[in-house]
Image: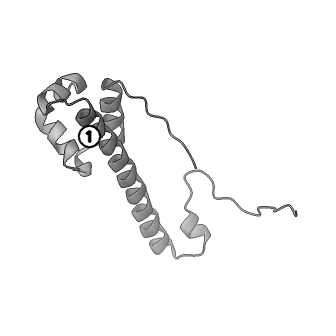
């Protein structure tokens, strides 16, 4: 087995698309699109877990709202997948208030 040597890494906060040779404008657009996709995917995963927990516990939206310390329309927004209305932090707090732990796993 041969060892692979990495000749370049993109620093934290850097732009891998710029490092790959895209023009500065295109690199910024690709990075912004990538960041939005990653955040949206994380939000959907968190919202799915909140919804699953509410359903498994047979909670009404009003009961879930009280547990999560939000109003009932916020619960509805979670359960209908309106990800743009939430930050990742807010969704993590909601899960914690439902007694769930959030663990970031890199696979």
The location of residue 22, given as percent across then percent down, is 54, 76
The answer to which of 107 and 52 lies nearer the viewer is: 52
Identify the residue at image location x=24%, y=26%: 68
Instruction: Give coordinates of residue 24: x percent, y percent.
Output: 50, 72
What residue is at 68 percent from the left and 59 percent from the top?
A: 9
Quarter of the rendering containing residue 10: bottom right
Question: What residue would you read off at disc 1?
Answer: 51
Q: Is residue 84 left or right of residue 17?
A: left
Q: Which quarter of the rendering shows the N terminus?
A: bottom right
- At horizontal 22% and vertical 46% (from top left) the residue drawn is 85
Q: Residue at x 44, y 33 (%)?
A: 102
Q: Position of residue 34 (x, y in %)?
A: 44, 62
Residue in front for this viewpoint, 33 or 3: 3
Q: Choose between 76 and 34: the one closer to the eye.
A: 76
Query: Can residue 87 be spotted in the picture?
Result: no
Task: From the viewer's perspective, tell me whether residue 8 is left or right of residue 87.
Answer: right
**Rendered position, 93 above or below 88:** above
Across and down, in percent, residue 57 comes to 25, 29
Q: How many marks?
A: 1
Task: Name the colour scheme.
Answer: one colour
Q: Give the crowd class for mark 1: few <14, some 14-19, many >=20 residues within 10 Å.
A: many
Q: Which residue is outermost to the right?
A: 1
Q: Closest to the observer: 31 or 53?
A: 53
Q: Is residue 103 visible?
A: yes
Q: Secondary structure at mark 1?
A: helix
């Amino acid at each position: 087995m041969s060892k692979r040597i990495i000749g370049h890494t993109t620093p934290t906060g850097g732009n891998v698309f710029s490092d790959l040779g895209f023009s500065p404008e295109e690199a910024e657009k690709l990075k912004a699109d990538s960041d939005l996709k990653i955040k949206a995917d994380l939000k959907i995963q968190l919202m799915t877990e909140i919804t699953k927990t509410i359903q498994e516990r047979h909670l009404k939206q009003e009961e879930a709202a009280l547990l999560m310390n939000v109003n009932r329309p916020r619960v509805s927004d979670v359960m209908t997948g309106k990800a743009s209305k939430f930050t990742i932090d807010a969704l993590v707090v909601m899960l914690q208030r439902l007694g769930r732990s959030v663990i970031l796993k890199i696979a």
